[in-house]
Amino acid sequence: MNIILLGPPGAGKGTQARRLTEDLGMVQLSTGDMLRAAVSAGTEVGKEAKAIMERGDLVTDEIVIKIIDDRLDEPDTEKGVIFDGFPRTLGQADALSDLLDRKGLALKSVVEMRCDDEQLVVRVTGRFTCGMCGEGYHYSFKMPAKEGVCDKCGSTDFKRRDDDNEEAFRTRLLNYYKDTSPLIGYYHAKGTLSPVDGTAAIDEVEKQIRAAITA
Ligand code: AP5
Ligand code: MG
Ligand code: ZN
């Protein structure tokens, strides 16, 4: 089963993708995470993407499509993929459709995570993650059970993203409305779109997504 989590910055795509991978055996393909890894590793792609990501703009379709194309050739994707943050433009959506056809894969459903803009800014500016395992936290909504220690792996190293400031967030949100939201109509027309209430509590959103993707 292959699914797409579609939603604005801070909608909870990463949070929910991580939960779904735990028992469904699917892999999370986050183009944001892959690009951040390229930036940290200082690869050519990373050098090109760094400033664009810090501003909150989109990297080129060519770069992300190549990343996804290569990643889908790895055997762990056979059990199913949760696309997190990809596709993000109509060009990427068409390219994904071609890629899936070429690789003999199908798209089960596209989950649209609906949110409220002002809630998103609070989520994004309060977010931090474990530097070791990537578990996501939030200063108001999800602190580690023991202060300063990751619930999942026990690490005491936490980090924040360079684009999680209000200015870059506003640019990311504008780009979502301009370039990504047309995908809602695109997938609706294909009959694969399932909207969920992304403003609900994390457990409730998870329930709605599970119901949508198994329907
Ligand atoms: P990316 O990393 O994908 O960032 P994004 O889309 O802006 O989304 P986020 O990761 O910020 O949010 P999320 O939906 O994953 O929310 P999360 O679960 O963390 O992309 C970064 C950049 O890379 C882009 O700007 C672009 O430059 C580039 N890029 C990536 N993909 C690209 C592509 N395909 N094409 C071109 N460029 C690309 O949750 C947020 C916070 O809220 C967390 O603290 C969480 O704990 C909390 N939270 C989550 N759910 C809830 C809830 N229900 N209630 C309360 N709090 C919640
Ligand atoms: Mg994310
Ligand atoms: Zn951890």
Image (cartoon, grey):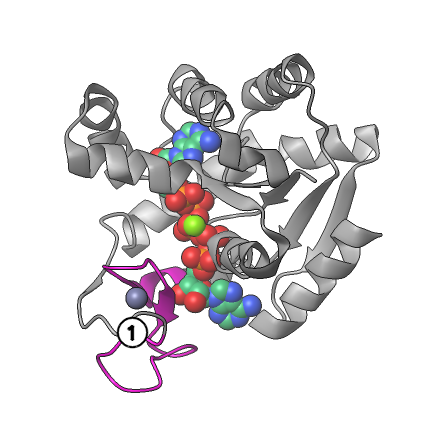
| Res 43 seen here | yes
| Res 80 seen here | no
CB at mark 1 closer than 8 A to ligand 3?
yes
Kind of residue indicated by mark 1: Cys
Q: Quadrant of residue 129?
A: bottom left
From the image, give the main secondary structure of the stretch colored magenta: loop
Q: Is residue 22 above or below residue 59?
A: below
* Secondary structure state at the residue bearing disc 1: loop
Please tell me whether residue 195 belongs to the stretch shown in magenta. no
Q: Quadrant of residue 188?
A: top right
Tell which residue pokes out farthest to the bottom in this image. 146
On screen, residue 8 versus residue 70, left or right, reads: right
- The percent coordinates of residue 131 (x first, y second) are 23, 59
List the residue tagged with mark 1.
Answer: 150
Q: Magenta span covers which residues?
A: 124-151
Q: Nearer the viewer, residue 22 or 31?
A: 22
Q: Nearer the viewer, residue 184 or 80?
A: 80
- The percent coordinates of residue 101 (x first, y second) are 69, 16
- Residue in view at x 60 percent, y 60 percent: 23
